Image: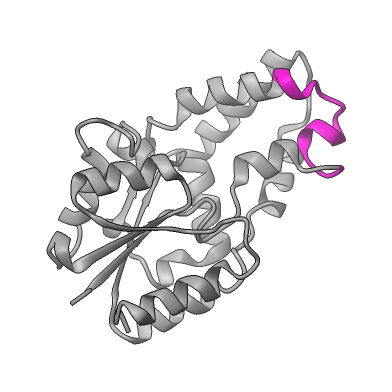
């Protein structure tokens, strides 16, 4: 019997912040500020490695430091308040997923998060999507707090997620949109579902699949 569902955030509960904020056609940072796309991709990857595995209670200071470094690396002086305002515009729920969270919560299915994430993007996601309504902080496992990604060979994030729950691993299902994360979860022994993040009907597909699996 499934007692808990563990969700990734980017590409599952919400659209990926990084990809859309930087590269969305006409409305992303590259388009608005006429930045070099390849250079920004290299810089974004570098900064992700710098900030995805560190935590701080002053998450807003981490965010400011991040964008100061970004400006330095692209050799621009883009106002940070403009970038942050733009960031919030790209934190959008995946269609149908808020409704699915409500359904699972109403059925007393325990919910958790296991996400490769920075402190600042997570806090903005949590606030704008009201994630704590269904998933308390103690069941929110982030790479920035654990210090390693989900692909780590020692499975630290999955260990932390299972430990946070009132269920055994065999009573949990993990949902992610990245094949490498699903592969690691399977190697860990966690039943997993690959979420079709590019499908407009992804939430409906997932809801039907969870019903077939008799989660609710």
Say if residue 149 shows up in the picture. yes
Q: Position of residue 72 (x, y in %)?
A: 68, 14
> Would residue 29 appear left or right of 157 to someone viewing this image?
right
Q: Position of residue 11 (x, y in %)?
A: 54, 53
The magenta stretch is 26-39
Farthest left residue in view: 168
**Looking at the image, which is closer to me, 61 or 197?**
197
The structure residue drawn at horizontal position 63% and vertical position 19%, both measured from the top left corner, is 42
The structure residue drawn at horizontal position 85% and vertical position 34%, both measured from the top left corner, is 31
Farthest front residue in view: 212
- Quarter of the N terminus within the rendering: bottom left
Q: Is residue 40 above or below residue 55?
A: above
> Would residue 205 appear left or right of 183 to someone viewing this image?
right
- Quarter of the C terminus within the rendering: bottom left
**Looking at the image, which is closer to me, 10 or 180?**
180
Q: How many marks?
A: 0
The colouring scheme, among rainbow, by chain, secondary structure or one colour, is one colour
Q: Is residue 49 above or below residue 182?
A: above
Q: Is residue 145 above or below residue 12?
A: above
Q: Position of residue 94 (x, y in %)?
A: 59, 64
Q: Position of residue 120 (x, y in %)?
A: 51, 42
Q: Is residue 28 magenta?
A: yes
> Would residue 183 appear left or right of 88 to someone viewing this image?
left
> Would residue 182 appear left or right of 11 to someone viewing this image?
left
Q: Write down the quadrant of residue 108 in the picture.
A: bottom left
**Looking at the image, which is closer to me, 186 or 63?**
186
Say if residue 101 shows up in the picture. no
The structure residue drawn at horizontal position 22% and vertical position 39%, both measured from the top left corner, is 155
Q: Is residue 78 magenta?
A: no
Q: Write down the quadrant of residue 20 in the picture.
A: top right
The structure residue drawn at horizontal position 76% and vertical position 43%, both measured from the top left corner, is 24
């Amino acid at each position: 019997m499934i007692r808990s569902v563990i969700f990734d955030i980017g590409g599952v509960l919400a659209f990926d912040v990084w990809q859309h904020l930087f590269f969305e056609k006409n409305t992303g940072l590259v388009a608005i500020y006429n930045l070099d796309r390849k250079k920004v991709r290299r810089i974004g990857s570098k900064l992700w490695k710098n900030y995805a595995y560190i935590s701080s209670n002053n998450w807003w200071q981490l965010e400011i430091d991040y964008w100061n470094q970004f400006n330095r690396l692209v050799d621009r002086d883009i106002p940070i308040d403009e970038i942050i305002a733009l960031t919030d515009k790209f934190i959008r729920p995946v269609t149908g997923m808020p409704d699915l969270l409500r359904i699972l919560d109403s059925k007393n299915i325990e919910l958790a998060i296991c996400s490769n994430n920075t402190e600042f993007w997570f806090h903005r996601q949590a606030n704008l999507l009201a994630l704590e309504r269904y998933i308390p902080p103690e069941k929110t496992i982030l790479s920035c707090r654990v210090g390693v990604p989900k692909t780590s060979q020692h499975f630290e994030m999955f260990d932390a997620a299972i430990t946070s729950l009132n269920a055994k691993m065999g009573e949990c299902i993990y949902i992610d949109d990245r094949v490498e994360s699903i592969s690691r979860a399977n190697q860990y022994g966690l039943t997993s579902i690959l979420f079709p993040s590019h499908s407009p009907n992804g939430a409906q597909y997932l809801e039907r699949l969870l019903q077939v699996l008799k989660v609710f």
